[in-house]
Image (cartoon, rainbow, N blue to C red):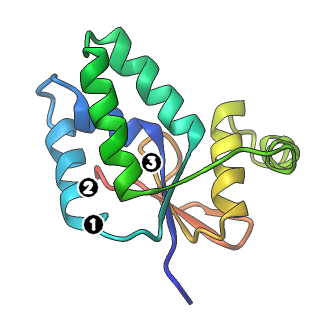
Amino acid sequence: MINRSFVDTNLFIYAYSKDNDGKNDKARNFFKNHIQSRETFISIQVINELCAWLHRNSYSLRNIHQITDEINNSFNIVPIGFHISKRAIDLKDKYKFEWWDALLLSTALENNCNSYFTEDLQHNQIIESKMKIINPLL
């Protein structure tokens, strides 16, 4: 089985955060040490959420372009289609996730990911008997 993973927005936010709360170093180390493969996915939703956060946190538009180019060169960025939104409705109902989390999880499942990296959800939870949620900041 190919190990395919999906990374949630919050880990990017911690990696680019200028706060010194420990999470930013852990997130940077996570990306440096564990994400070396094009078998790692994010969705365009992650890019949009990260861009909004970077802009709110006074990153220049030039820096935002550089960051998104780096991410584009390192990850598979996948779209969100109608079928992903439909599946997210079912995930939201079944697991009681927030909408945006359900949409990202649906995208990860659609792309056959078996690991989902986030700080926001329950560590070690298995989704649809296929994908494990992992909190790399623990």
Instruction: Assess whether mark 3 and mark 2 are in contact (beta carbons under 8 angstroms).
Output: no
Amino acid at dot 2:
Phe
Among the two numbered marks 1 and 3 on one chain, the one whose residue lies closer to the N terminus: 1
Cα distance between the residues tagged 1 and 3: 14 Å
Measured from the top left, where is residue 63 in percent x and y?
24, 25
Q: Residues within 10 Å of mark 2 (few under 14, many from 20)?
A: some
The residue tagged with tag 2: helix, strand or loop?
helix
Amino acid at circle 3:
Thr
Q: Amino acid at mark 1?
A: His
Q: Which residue is mark 1?
A: 34
Choose mark 1 or mark 3, whichever is in front. 1
Residue drawn 61% across the image and 68% down it: 131
Q: Is residue 82 left or right of residue 9?
A: right
Residue name at image x 24 percent, y 38 percent: 15
Mark 1 closeness class: few <14, some 14–19, many ≥20 residues within 10 Å: few
| 127 relative to 32 in the view: left or right | right
- Relative image position of residue 80 (x, y in whole percent): 72, 44
Which mark is drawn over residue 61?
none
What is the crowding at mark 3: few (fewer than 14 residues within 10 Å), some, or many (at least 20)?
A: many
Discs 1, 2 touching: Cβ within 8 Å: yes
Q: CA distance from mark 2 to mark 3?
A: 12 Å
Quadrant containing the N terminus in the rendered view: bottom right
Q: Which residue is mark 2?
A: 31
Q: Disc 1 on helix, strand or loop?
A: helix
Which residue has dot 3 on it?
118
Up-down relation of residue 57 to residue 121 (above or below): above
